[in-house]
Amino acid sequence: MSDSYTYENIKDITKGYDRYFGRVTFTKPPANNSSIVIKYKKPIEYLTAADRVNLAYNPTAGMFGNDLSQVMDGIDYGG
């Protein structure tokens, strides 16, 4: 099926920093009301710090846990 579409990552700097958008282009338009499922893996450098902790940080014995307030400042706004 990969011959029926192409995909690309597009770098956007209009906000003053680098961000990326994905674009899928179909060689033939899909039928009306058809379901399209897109599965992808985003490179870790594109993730926010919180997402990197939640998805990639795998603590071992003696390390802080996966709770964001344990590994990042400013997360716990106790009150």
Image: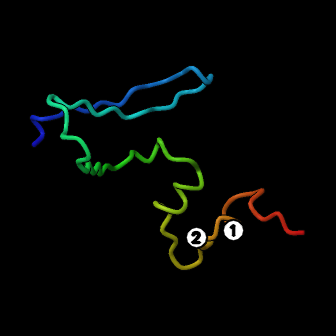
Could you tell me which secondary element the residue under label 1 belongs to? helix
Q: Is residue 64 above or below residue 14?
A: below
Viewer-closest of 74 and 3: 3
Q: Is residue 77 above or below residue 23?
A: below
> What is the quadrant of residue 69 in the picture?
bottom right
Q: Which residue is mark 1?
A: 70
Q: Which residue is mark 2?
A: 66
Residue 41 image offset from top left, x and y in percent: 34, 50
Viewer-closest of 18 and 33: 33
> What is the quadrant of residue 61 in the picture?
bottom right
- Residue at screen point 38% across, 46% down: 42
Tags 2 and 1 touching, CB below 8 Å: yes
Could you tell me which secondary element the residue under label 2 belongs to? loop
**Quadrant of the image containing the C terminus:** bottom right
Residue 20 image offset from top left, x and y in percent: 45, 32
Q: Is residue 15 above or below residue 51?
A: above
Residue 13 image offset from top left, x and y in percent: 54, 21
- Residue at screen point 59% across, 50% down: 49
As drawn, is 58 to the left or to the right of 50? left
Q: Crowding at label 2, few (<14), some or many (≥20) Cα neighbours within 10 Å?
A: some
Q: Amino acid at mark 1?
A: Gln
As drawn, is 60 to the left or to the right of 16? left
Could you give the CA–CA distance between mark 2 and mark 1, rounded to whole angstroms? Answer: 7 Å
